[in-house]
Image (spheres, rainbow, N blue to C red):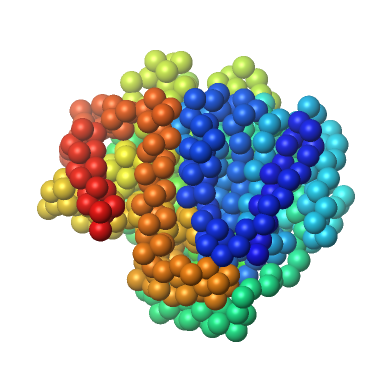
Amino acid sequence: MRKFIEIDLHRQHVLERQLAGRELAEAGRYLIARMLVERDVAAIDPLAPENPLIFSVGPFAGTNFSNANRLSVGCKSPLTGGVKEANSGGTFGFAMGQLQIAGITFNGASDAWVVIRITKDGDISFDDASPYLGLGNFDCAQKLHAAYGEKTSLALCGPVGEYLGLMAGVAFSDTDNRPSRLAARGGVGAVMGAKKIKAVVIDKDRMPPVHDRKKVMGAIKDYGKKLGESVAVQSLKTTGTAMVADLTNHLGALPVRNFSSGQLTGADDGPLKMGGDFIRELNSGRGGETSHACMPGCLIKCSNVFVDDSGRELVSPLEYETIGLLGTNCGLTEPDDVARLNETANDLGVDSIELGATIAVLMEAGEGAFGDLPFMHACLEEIRAGSEKGRLYASGTARVGAALKVARVPVIKKQAISAYDPRVVEVTGISMMLTAQGADHTVGNAPSFKCDDKSIAELVAESLRMQINSAVADSFGLCVFGRSVTDDNLQLIADAINDAFDAGVDPEFIRHIALETLRLEAAFNKAAGFDDDDDELPAFFTDEPLPPTGKTNRLFSQEVNQQMQALLASATMQ
């Protein structure tokens, strides 16, 4: 059994209910969508107290089941106005599982800023947060650990979240207590700020009890063995997510200078300096960590600890999406430059995808030149200060584009498009168009899928397959990078859930949860006023051929929605 905690922030009242069996497998992204629909949140102002902030972990949280300690954070998004689930690695979900907490819902809003303290004895207290207000995340984490001890994990509202900046995420502790693992997208940090929660501090403890420990440990071992045999997993472990830059640059789909090109020029002269191979060798030669686990128990270890030429740590992690949006999309060509910007973004607790897209739109508007590093640092300092300019920048790409009357604004549902140009990486483009989450690649990413000779129907079918697989991962606390194993081993996952909780689930239950997640999210957005027009790609993707491939967009919301609805109807009937 595990418990679900409801916290009334205004009254500082805590209500707990016990969960058992199948309820413990109804978690993560699925649970968030279900709760938001059941509570009729769609019509609520996302920064109002009535918008709940939900933390949910999967059934294996607290164990060393590889890549199974992800934490889902959900609410109505103040950035998009639609449903939002943003998830993160780190140790917070792990700690929740160890304390046998399946989820926490933060309801209402506190009258004053608080630090919420959750101990291994089950006590929950509300402490004065005033000593921590206005601090960057790194200083804040240091002071919180000094006050509450090192054997804790943190959830932080950074300084941008404090003033309700819409690119604010929620920062969580990594395995070395850095507050650098972000549930980043959709403005979830602004919702935390609206509730006046500066931090949640939770104890770490020990592996929680399970129904049949021997069988669960056997499943953990079997899953780990399969990960070790996966070529895709080994590539991630060796080179990290930065390797995706090598792929997208080769395909001509890397965002360069506000999506005006798909490839860095001169890349054929040697390894791409913004790619995985180059970054690994550079970092290794300086003494950095080229393979690092973002959460306890993970065998993939696709993260890193990137250092400068003196061996000083710059950032952990330096990953593909940041390289693409905050790097090449802004005209940068040096990984050190991106790493320093990334370090500041983590200190502010903001989404590096939204940040990079926003700065590139500022450059498009002539506020700064592409590749102008001092301008980028100045933007970040405006955001830190919360100046008039900084608050505009922190409102995100769509709002900045509208304010400055920029024509080329790469967003869907007011959220910045991830680092895959949809003119080339079309399956991911469809996923970003159709998801209720906004332009989020994690809902169904397939950058290596060969699109050129495929019909729209075939592309939509692949997008649905990837969306189902991603919804499985997000709903069961699993990292999507284990999907080369997870997708083909749903029986193993179902058996492990049963061994842990005597839940009586089967692979069809897992597939049903994924499909129901997609249905609930679509229902939420429909109730919030979204329609097919909100799924359309910005016009410049259709009007402008993308160098060097010369491709233009052939994905339009009416056709892809019709294809997707037909496939979903068929999948639901099966």
Q: Nearer the viewer, residue 453 or 482?
A: 482
Which quarter of the picture shows residue 218?
bottom right
Q: Residue at x 41, y 62 (%)?
A: 510
Which quarter of the picture shows residue 283?
bottom right
Left or right of 364? Residue 32 is right
User: Where residue 434 sits: x, y (%)?
Assistant: 32, 39
Q: Nearer the viewer, residue 473 or 227?
A: 473
Q: Residue at x 83, y 45 (%)?
A: 125
Residue 433 drawn above or below residue 476: above
Residue 438 drawn above or below residue 123: above
User: Where residue 554 sits: x, y (%)?
Assistant: 17, 38
Q: Residue at x 41, y 29 (%)?
A: 527
Left or right of 564? Residue 344 is right
Which quarter of the picture shows residue 100?
bottom right
The quadrant of the image that shows the C terminus is bottom left
Q: Nearer the viewer, residue 496 or 19?
A: 19
The number of numbered badges drawn on the structure is 0
Residue 528 shows up from this direction: yes
Left or right of 62? Residue 133 is right
The quadrant of the image that shows the N terminus is bottom right
Residue 282 drawn above or below residue 342: below
User: Where residue 474 sits: x, y (%)?
Assistant: 47, 54
Q: Nearer the viewer, residue 173 or 280?
A: 173
Residue 232 shows up from this direction: no
Q: Residue at x 76, y 66 (%)?
A: 205
User: Where residue 541 sits: x, y (%)?
Assistant: 25, 32
